[in-house]
Image (spheres, coloured by chain):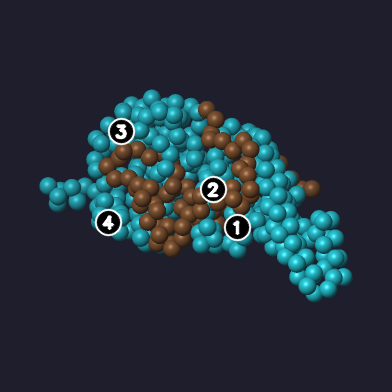
Amino acid sequence: MDRPIKTLQDKNSYLDLQKEKRITLLEVLDRALDKGVVISGDIVISIADVDLIYLGLKVLLSSVETMERLRGTPFAGATEEPT
Amino acid sequence: MNTKKAKEGLIYLYCITDKVPKLKEIENLVDKPYFIYHQSLYAIVNKVKESEFDEENLKRNLADLEWIKAKASIHEKAIEGIMKDACVIPFKFATIFNTEDNLKAMLSQHLKEFKALLIKLEDKEEWGVKIYCNSEKLKENLMQEDEQLLNIDKEINSSAPGKAYLLKKKKEELLNIAANKKLNEYGQVSFDRLKEKPTGVRINKLLPKEVTERNDEMILNSAFLINKDKVGDFLNIVEDIRAKYTDKGLFFDCTGPWPPYNFCNPKKGKIHNG
């Protein structure tokens, strides 16, 4: 089977291919709006504000619990980042 | 006082790094980002207008998805431009300071944590893998594989209507149980393989179909922190599990490299992940 990544060059072209579709609303909500360092700056979007965005989308976020219900049990070894 | 402040604008913080950042032009952005140097850290920032980003206007704009998409895209591109050449700590969308002094005070306050974090993130990339499941396809596969289900199918065909009805009910129940079991197995095997190479693993909340805009259900939303020299191995593992489970009804969405949004969570202090 063809391996997608052989050299750095291949890797770069792989990255170029996905570049355009990457910054989707999905990824925006999932990363820049939800993660990243939160500091007590002068103005910061709070979790409540992010919830408002979802309200605007008329959706409710499913939680990890939903995933666990769907799958029966949680994945073993699903941990926070090790330090 | 207010009029003076309005002219000055607000300071929007994208990310920080400890190397001289190479600043790049960003599409749809008139002002190029610039940096503020303070105590060995470079904060990559931009001037933004009060009419868009002060507390009141920001709240209003957050109800506008098109606005969010456009601004979040600038946020992402600004950070990606810097992270091509340097290790970065990405900040959450719309982290705003009234003055440069306030930003510097924040940098001083968290200097130790930021420096430790930059060491931890050095030479690493964040990648994301979202796994989706098409339960119809999963069940179709099971109907062809599972002996118990195949037997019950035969029995239904040779039974009187009353009994066939009850057997069909039973089949449905068994199929759901079997599908759950398989989904758990595929998910666990995939996840175990995905975490072989990374140094950091995060599982995030699942996103609903309205956000994913897909017909299948998200079953895993994960982020990985990977040493740059292991990224190739990681992507090969993604291809392996993709080859193994695509026909069974799973879909793998692998994206990266991302700024390490999911891995800038120091143990102590006021900084935390959203």
Residue B85 is situated, as x and y percent measured from the top left of the image, at: 49, 37
The residue type indicated by label 1 comes to Glu
Residue at mark 4 to residue at mark 3: CA–CA distance = 23 Å
The disc label shown at residue A65, or none: 2
Question: Residue under circle 4?
Answer: B57
| SS at badge 4 | helix
Q: Quadrant of residue B17?
A: top left
Q: Residue drawn at (62%, 60%), measured in percent from left and top?
A: B216
Residue at mark 1 to residue at mark 3: CA–CA distance = 41 Å
Q: Which chain is cyan?
A: B
Q: Quadrant of residue B117?
A: top left
Q: Chain of mark 3?
A: B
Q: Residue drawn at (32%, 36%), measured in percent from left and top?
A: B36
Q: Residue drawn at (33%, 31%), measured in percent from left and top?
A: B107
Mark 2 is surrounded, within 10 Å at the Cα level, by few (under 14), some (14 to 19) or many (20 or more) other residues, namely some
Question: Residue under circle 1?
Answer: B217
Residue B196 is left or right of residue A40, and the answer is right
Q: Residue furthest bottom?
A: B161
The residue type indicated by label 3 comes to Met
Mark 1 is surrounded, within 10 Å at the Cα level, by few (under 14), some (14 to 19) or many (20 or more) other residues, namely many
Q: Residue furthest front?
A: B162
Residue B160 is left or right of residue A19, and the answer is right
- 1 vs 3, front mark: 1
Colour chosen for chain A: brown
Q: Earlier in the sequence, mark 1 or mark 4?
A: 4
Question: Residue under circle 3?
Answer: B106
